[in-house]
Image: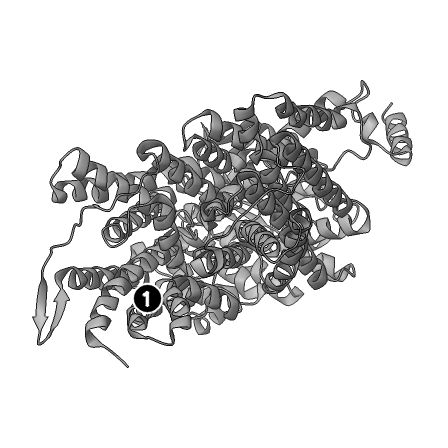
Amino acid sequence: MFYAGLALNGLAVGCVAALAAVGLLATYRVTGVFNIAFGAVAVFCAYVMWQCVRVWGMPVGVAGLLVLGVVAPGIGLLLERAVYRPLRSGASGLLVATLGVLVLQLGLVFLLWGGRSYVDAPSLLPAGDVRLGTLHLPYATIVELCVVVVVAGGLTVLLRATRVGLMVRAVVDDRDLAAAVRVPADRLAAGGWAFGSFLAGLAGVLWAPIYHLDPYSLTLTVLETMGVAVLARLASLPVAVGAALVIGVGQTELTAVHPAVRWQGLVDAFHTNLFVLVLFVALMVLPRLGIRDSGALGGLHRVGARRSRADVVGRLPLGALSLVLGLPLFFDPGDLRAALAVPALAVVFVSLVVATGYAGQISLGQAGYAGLGALFMAKLAEGGVPWLVALFLGPVLVVPVGWLTGYPAIHRRGLYLALTTFATAAVVGRFVFAQPVFVGGLAVMRPPGFVDDHWFYGLELGCLGLALVVVWTLHTGPLGRALVALRDSEAAAVSAGIDVRRVKVFVFACAAGLAGLGGALTASAAQAFNPTDFDPVQGLVWFAAVAVWGVDSAVGAVVGAAALVAVDVGTVVGVSGLLIGAGAVLLGRFPGGIAGVVRRVGDWFAVSPVRGERRLSPAGREVADRVRERRA
Amino acid sequence: MLTLDALRVRHGPLEALHGVSLTIVPGVSLLLGRNGAGKSTLLRAVAGYLRPSSGRIVWQGSDISRASIGQRAAAGVMLIPDEGGVFRSLSVRENLELFADGGVEPAFEAFPDLRALSRRRAALLSGGEQQMLALSRALIAPWRLLLVDELSHGLAPYLATRLYAVLAELAAAHPDRAVVLAEPHPHEAFAHAGEVQHVHVLRRGELAASGSSSEFDAITL
């Protein structure tokens, strides 16, 4: 069955998706960065547009000119100057930096507009339509199609056939060498970012009237069009445009499919979430992207050796931490209620430390595992399992899920792995957490005996302690060394006899189980299953937060969770996003995050009068003595 | 022409050059030193890829220690690195067009092999072909100070000989310009590099010796 009228509607959806995908690809082509923050820039511009028209009463045309001509390119220039140019010398840490920009801009949206969603986003495009026999083709669709074709075509011609295009490609390839052959690299890079940001703004302004203007869901919608870009393997603009149009049409055609009633929900889920599905399937099927991935992890980990013996300074943070975590037991009831979120979030953060900090596997999908942990727990309890057993059995059931989703990770790394894990969380979020079939009428209660906030907080601390013990076991001994070897160099790990496949899958399974436990605790603390707690975009925020606090520090993760909750409770919404985003953006300047800085300061204090003496083994001390003799 | 004054360069916590002072004059100079002696660091600092932590780099009378790569290139400083001297995602011809100040013909005349490969992406070239392409930059773009980092790095001996021959010819044609060759192996360097006027030896980030080539004996170095 094919309905022409529906196909035209689908064309409208496909056009805007194509525009976002073309923008994403164009940004990648002219800057060399796959910009995850694209969605956030789009949303920010859409909100500014709304503010201009609905609050300040500007004419739509003027506002559009202001947003697309000044605000969007301005954001691009600002980001290039403040974030990406300082990073390029290392050419690493880009993934975390783009993630930081995303979190930062979302935080800004929450701060300025309180995260409220609006349905009256102004439309730049003319209303009305063209009649084609019995069919109506809206003007908006025609304009959008033209914009897509002009941008895609113009960009192809510019890059392939002009001297400027050649220079742009040279700057993307190797900025230093381009500067050395007297190409104005800085100006071209700035121009590239301004252009990419303009396209993001354009996508946001055109999307907003079609969907709700809502920070999370609109960001997610734009991020989901990454599937189209991935299908085009980040290289082919025509493939991206074609795929977007086909998916858009397919999406609306599905609304006409009416199977048996019990399957209707599933079909509905498909037709509203076809882009997520495409993103997921494309990432699973395509062996690799046409993209350079080197150094995506840069800046996350601190450089240099670990102190071999624990000393007073090394134990200080742990002591202080247990003291701080014990404090809420003496808080007044309201504050204790708020503090309940801390250990739960800390367990999720610790799971990220295992996956990303120790084993170097970027995982943006922890929100999905956390939600599944909570869901499994509630379902088990519904089936008659006691709550206390369900609290632990639910997360255990997440382990196989982590095991399964860990398989694609075997051959993926860097950005590709990050996208795959994100897509997993997005699919789970859209097809499970958003479906009333699975989460409707779900009751969540605390285990009997732990209903009181004090007792439940104690239980949470126990779980956190358990998680930390698991993490500590993973970080020491042969397994810990294998994980770190995997993080440093996969090729070297293989040649050293480490079964990389098994270790990777194992790490993902462990991290999934821990995240599940954290999710189960979160839901128990709130005594409700709240899908927004496990939003895929939330997973991005969590990742950025853990990165800022030091991705390879479990203590840092716990402190980070406490700080995040404290900031969220103590200030207005959005401040935490701003802080985390700013930290992630600056992470390139202080590798290892806050924990790394603390450790360096600790090292500085721990050095004995004879420089470096305490860090040497007996054999090393002997060598040092000999060197000193020879010098004397 | 080029004077380094107590140049210190750091790579993060490690200092690679501990205050090197030397002068480069027109003609061919050799910069000798083992792996890790600081040859590449010195060349990269002069070309602007690395920022010195202290000390001065004076080029033709003006201090360029803080100048950007582009400014130094405009002043005539050119670095041919041991790897990464080409745009890997661009074709050979596109590379040459970016390098060139005028036509690209001189490059094809010196390296006829490149003509047949002109549509191929640089990433798909062999190491020797990439090095030819990188060295072509010195043939078709203007320079007054040419810094060449381990031209023979990982190349078959006959290829290395050819590249050195092109370089020696280029240096001989412009006696008023300076060429600095960084080499780990003194014997090969003396055998290949033609008329060497000056030799500087780096050891562990410090200048160990400096003088005219007649003062050095390749056998005892």
Residue B21 seen in the figure: no
Q: Position of residue B176 (x, y in %)?
A: 47, 43
Q: Position of residue A449 (x, y in %)?
A: 67, 38
Q: What residue appears at the point 10 percent right and 64 percent down from the top-left corner?
A: A129
Name the residue nearer the viewer: A288 or A282. A282
Residue under mark 1: which chain is it in?
A: A
Name the residue nearer the viewer: A321 or B183. A321
Q: What residue appears at the point 48 percent right and 28 percent down from the top-left corner?
A: A569
Is residue A627 toward the left or the right of residue B67 in the image?
right
Disc 1 is placed on an element classified as helix
Is residue B77 toward the left or the right of residue A209 in the image?
right
Quarter of the image where one finds residue A185? top left
Quarter of the image where one finds residue A226? bottom left
Is residue A409 toward the left or the right of residue B58 in the image?
right
Q: Position of residue A546 (x, y in %)?
A: 57, 39
Name the residue nearer the viewer: B36 or A557. A557
Identify residue type, mark 1.
Ala
Residue A150 seen in the figure: yes
| Location of residue A249 with respect to A599 vertically, above or below | below
